[in-house]
Amino acid sequence: MSTVTPADTRAVAARALAEIALDGRSLREVLAQQLPRLPQSRERAFASALVYAGARGWLRWNAALPRLLQKPLPRRLGALQALLVLGLTQMEDLGVPAHAAVAATVDAARALGHDAQRGLVNAVLRRWLRERDALLAQLDADAVSRTRLPDWLLQALHADWPAYAASIISASNAEVPPTLRVNSARGSRTDYLQCLAAAAIDAQAHAWIDSAVTLAASLDVTRLPGWFEGSCAVQDGAAQLAASLLDAPTGARVLDACAAPGGKACHILERSAVQLTALELAPARLTRVRDNLARLRLHAELRVGDATQPAAWWDGVTYTHILLDAPCSATGVLRRQPDVRLHRRASDLPALIAQQRALLDALWPLLARGGTLLYATCSILRGENAVQAAAFLAAHGDAEALPITLPAGRADGPGWQILPGEDGLDGMFYARLRKRTAC
Ligand SMILES: C[S@@+](CC[C@H](N)C(=O)[O-])C[C@H]1O[C@@H](n2cnc3c(N)ncnc32)[C@H](O)[C@@H]1O
């Protein structure tokens, strides 16, 4: 029997949130390390929900703390600071009744080893309840604490997408259930929806992405029918567009140049029997590609290598299709990766843009004449997307953009931009770049 109390669960969540928000660690990595401390799946799900909500709301509720504390908390009390943020998050975002949230948060201070600070936690949360209306008005008066997004990103959104900034902000703060990709190599989506219904899992087919199924609520994916047999994978619908836009037929020689964790590579292989090389810079991340291929019963050639240095790994035979799903700001997926808003800086952008350009330039010679390179990012910043693709076309006379028309999003420069929340999708940019057969 579990001896873990609700206070222990909150303490695990607070420690995790402190590592993410104060130490700059990735949410996925921290959860992978911290959640196994909780023995029951219900406790892990609750801690995970707290951490996601805490990261999403950090820029708002952490901004409330200086107004509630007499002096700032020292750095050694980082987990206590995160616990206070989680106390506010529970009351304001997760609908936990105030008395329950206060009592549980005070108990969690003890579970964190901060028994002496229980009075402080109680006083801070009770002060919030007394002064709530005035404090909410103060938080709403500041753009960062109102929108929960960093100032540099707000400026970029207003510069790039002035008419859409409000909807992007709202979608970036939404809590969304996972989308599945049904493995068409193992069965039809209609059949899989029936399996989900038989397992009492509420789900819906995406209206126009033929592999996508949206779940009504988050769940432990290993409970999904056929999970271990490779019937489905978790992947946002916008990411599921890559395989059809690349449109590699049976027998095509395909390079996925930035492959990990392998979602798009697996989807390409599910659609047709291509010869696919999955290249990845980070050896540990290539393991995730290997695991995903194995679970989905697919095969690809796996290579560790730097896509900007083909001499080290390329066999000299051109590819008919290349997917470049480039490292980017990830500003289109804040709703699924809420920690990106805490970690990404405006100063990261020039290096990312230069890296994307270096990848495009290095991979272009590897593409056969008449072949297609699909450039993809999960960014919504035009410098990484439309401007990047247009600059590439201007510099490469043998490149042309193939048109893209989808039911959601809009043409932007030579590509297509989907903004977060449009038709329930993540933000994603695609450009189809074809190498002319003759110059
Ligand atoms: C956006 S992710 C790719 C996601 C993947 N396509 C999928 O659908 O699962 C970008 C990946 O590129 C890798 N990467 C970054 N620079 C690279 C380089 N120079 N060569 C190869 N891979 C690189 C990163 O480690 C990261 O795993």
Image: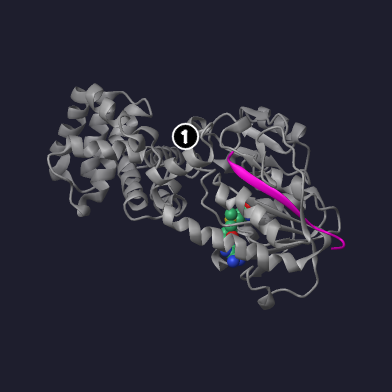
Residue for badge 1: 169
Instruction: Give above or below for 122 relative to 289.
Output: above
**365 or 100: nearer the viewer:** 365
**145 or 235: nearer the viewer:** 145
Instruction: Give above or below for 285 relative to 140.
Output: below
Would residue 90 appear left or right of 418 to someone viewing this image?
left
Callout 1 secondary element = helix
Q: How many marks?
A: 1
Q: Residue at the spot x=47%, y=38% of the render?
A: 158
Would residue 40 appear left or right of 75 to someone viewing this image?
right
Would residue 189 appear left or right of 6 to someone viewing this image?
right
Q: Is residue 431 magenta?
A: yes
Q: Give the quarter of the figure containing the N terminus.
A: top left
Q: Residue at the spot x=69%, y=46% of the render?
A: 415
Q: What segment is highlighted magenta in the picture?
A: 426-439
* Residue 351 percent location from the top left of the image: 50, 62
Instruction: Give above or below for 150 relative to 294.
Output: above
